Amino acid sequence: MTPDRNPGSKHMNQNPEQRQSFVVRIWTEPPTGKDPTSVWRGWVQHVRSGESVYIQSPQELLDFIHGWFGSFDPPPDHHLK
């Protein structure tokens, strides 16, 4: 018997229709004008549909991904360690 190289894989949803894949690109843009802060930017694409959006915050990234799953609630038997 070979060891499981990915212990989380037994919890991975085995139904391909319920799995989603995304391409994510993240970068910062240099400060402009009087604001010395770099600006967070990104782009995310849902692989199967090709739908993509430009994002300006980590929350926008999560919101886009959440739209494809509905809920991020763990299964009832899931225990964080």
Image (spheres, grey):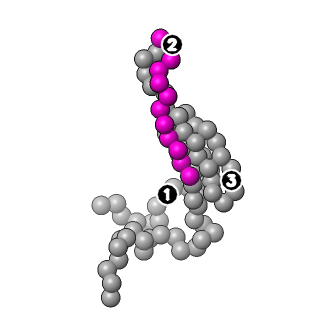
79 in magenta: no
Q: For the residue labelled by badge 1, is the local secondary structure a helix, a strand or a loop? A: loop
**Label 2, label 1: how far apart the Cα atoms are:** 42 Å
**Mark 2 / mark 3, whichever is N-terminal:** 2
Q: Which residues are magenta?
A: 23-34
Q: Which residue is mark 1?
A: 73
Dot 3 amino acid type: Gly
With respect to residue 1, does 75 lie above or below?
Answer: above
Image disc number at residue 50: 3
User: Split into 4 quadrants, where in the image is the C terminus?
Assistant: bottom left
Residue at left offset 36%, top offset 64%: 79
The percent position of residue 75, horizontal first and vertical second, equals 47, 65
User: Crowding at label 3, few (<14), some or many (≥20) Cα neighbours within 10 Å?
Assistant: few
User: Split into 4 quadrants, where in the image is the N terminus?
Assistant: bottom left
Q: For the residue labelled by badge 2, is the local secondary structure a helix, a strand or a loop? A: loop
Residue at left offset 46%, top offset 15%: 35
**Label 1, label 3: how far apart the Cα atoms are:** 25 Å
Q: Nearer the viewer, residue 57 or 78?
A: 57
Q: For the residue labelled by badge 3, is the local secondary structure a helix, a strand or a loop? A: loop
Dot 2 amino acid type: Gly
User: Crowding at label 2, few (<14), some or many (≥20) Cα neighbours within 10 Å?
Assistant: few
Q: Single out the mark in the foreground, 2 or 1.
A: 2
The percent position of residue 38, horizontal first and vertical second, equals 45, 25
With respect to residue 43, does 33 lie above or below?
Answer: above
The percent position of residue 9, horizontal first and vertical second, equals 42, 71
Q: Is residue 60 visible?
A: no
Q: Which residue is mark 2?
A: 33
30 in magenta: yes
